[in-house]
């Protein structure tokens, strides 16, 4: 059983989700739509789609142009006919389950763990004609606010359970699981931002509302012979072998990019040094030429002669005539 879990961000221009997009293709012979039996708070807009996996993936490619589509997980699991296959994508959250006071004194609290995230339970049943009946139970749980009464976390849960019949290799898509997340972040000057009425002048509050939809694709493959099982195992090994060359090619591209950046930086530094050298040379050319030693000696001799020459006394005025 191959499973793919997508998370789709809904925007103002695409607010109806995958259900509205695929429901409009009811005339497509490769696609069958229908509502699911809901349980646990799922809205009536939850739909299932049965058809060719390529057709649904092509619709997702078109959806990428309108909004953001991310693959959360793509697990594969092998299950026997009539046995349960369980896929969990998420984590575990601890919470206090019970507390008691022993005779020695002091309270003791027991802690349990609750699984959160996406849980998918599939029970396949294979008929002689090759039709696979899938009993699907899917649950989406998230961590909620802490309860003020028991000081314990709360959990938001949405679940759906249904039974579908598909042929070998066909894809089942479950859509319409929409979640609204409202996050609030407050920043500001310590103490001043907490002042009533005036605190808004020293800080700000940022509210973020995100609306996401989960889309789950399930594709069963019937393994009838050991040769087919070996073939699928070899396909998985080949896909894993392709991962290493891909990683190595990406590392090589990153190294080439870093080498190009280093060369560009060294060229820019050389250019800066060259410009600095040209500027210093121009400043040296603008300076007056230094006097030669011969000219300096001539100047000294002239100065010495000038100092050695006696001062001329002024001539007496001529005697008056009688």
Image (cartoon, rainbow, N blue to C red):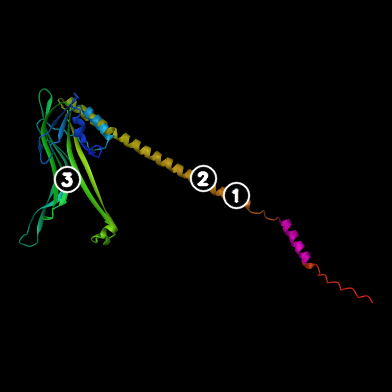
Q: Quadrant of residue 195?
A: bottom left
Query: Between marks 1 and 3, how big is the CA–CA gap?
Result: 71 Å
Nearer to the camera, 14 or 180 = 14
Rendered image: mark on residue 166: none
User: Range of the magenta residues?
Assistant: 292-306
- Mark 1 or mark 3, earlier in chain: 3
Q: Quadrant of the N terminus?
A: top left
Question: Residue 270: x and y, percent?
Answer: 51, 45
Question: Residue 252: x and y, percent?
Answer: 37, 37
Question: What residue is pinned by disc 1?
Answer: 282
Question: What residue is pinned by disc 3?
Answer: 142
Where disc 1 sits, the SS reads: helix
Query: Between marks 1 and 2, how big is the CA–CA gap?
Result: 17 Å
Q: Residue at x 32, y 37 (%)?
A: 247
Q: Is residue 39 above or below residue 230?
A: below
Asked whether 293 falls inside the magenta stretch, the response is yes
Nearer to the camera, 41 or 132 = 41
- Mark 2 or mark 3, earlier in chain: 3
Q: Main secondary structure of the magenta part?
A: helix
Nearer to the camera, 108 or 319 = 319
Q: Residue at x 75, y 64 (%)?
A: 303
Q: Is residue 116 above or below residue 63?
A: below
Q: Is residue 311 left or right of residue 42?
A: right
Question: Residue 154: x and y, percent?
Answer: 13, 49
Where disc 3 sits, the SS reads: strand
Check the image and name the residue furthest to the bottom: 322
Q: Residues within 10 Å of mark 2 (few under 14, many from 20)?
A: few
Query: Between marks 2 and 3, how big is the CA–CA gap?
Result: 57 Å
Judged by depth in the image, the label closer to the viewer, 1 or 2, is 1
Q: Residues within 10 Å of mark 1 (few under 14, many from 20)?
A: few
Question: What residue is pinned by disc 2?
Answer: 271
């Amino acid at each position: 059983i191959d499973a793919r879990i997508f998370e789709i961000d809904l925007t103002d221009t695409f607010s109806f989700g995958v259900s509205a997009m695929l429901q409009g293709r009811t005339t497509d012979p490769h696609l069958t739509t229908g509502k699911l039996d809901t349980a646990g708070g799922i809205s009536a807009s939850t739909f299932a789609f049965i058809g060719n996996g390529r057709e649904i993936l092509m619709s997702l490619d078109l959806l990428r142009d309108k909004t953001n589509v991310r693959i959360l997980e793509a697990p594969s699991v092998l299950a026997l006919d009539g046995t349960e296959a369980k896929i969990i994508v998420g984590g575990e959250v601890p919470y206090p389950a019970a507390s008691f006071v022993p005779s020695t004194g002091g309270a003791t609290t027991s802690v349990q763990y609750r699984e959160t995230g996406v849980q998918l339970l599939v029970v396949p049943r294979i008929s002689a004609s090759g039709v696979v009946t899938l009993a699907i139970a899917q649950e989406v749980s998230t961590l909620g606010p802490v309860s003020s009464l028991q000081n314990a976390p709360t959990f938001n849960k949405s679940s759906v359970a249904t039974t579908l019949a598909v042929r070998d290799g066909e894809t089942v898509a479950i859509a319409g699981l929409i979640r609204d997340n409202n996050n609030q972040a407050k920043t500001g000057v310590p103490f001043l931002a907490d002042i009533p009425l005036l605190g808004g002048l020293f800080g700000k509050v940022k509210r973020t509302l995100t609306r996401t939809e989960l889309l789950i694709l399930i594709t069963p493959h019937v393994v009838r012979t050991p040769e087919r099982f070996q073939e699928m195992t070899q396909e998985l090994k080949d896909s894993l072998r392709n991962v290493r060359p891909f990683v190595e090619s990406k590392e090589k591209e990153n190294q080439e990019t870093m080498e190009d950046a280093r060369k560009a930086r060294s060229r820019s530094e050389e250019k800066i040094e060259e410009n600095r050298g040209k500027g210093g040379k121009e400043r040296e050319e603008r300076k007056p030429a230094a006097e030669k030693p011969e000219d300096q000696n001539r100047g000294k001799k002239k100065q010495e002669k000038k100092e050695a020459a006696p001062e001329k006394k002024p001539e007496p005025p001529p005697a008056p005539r009688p």
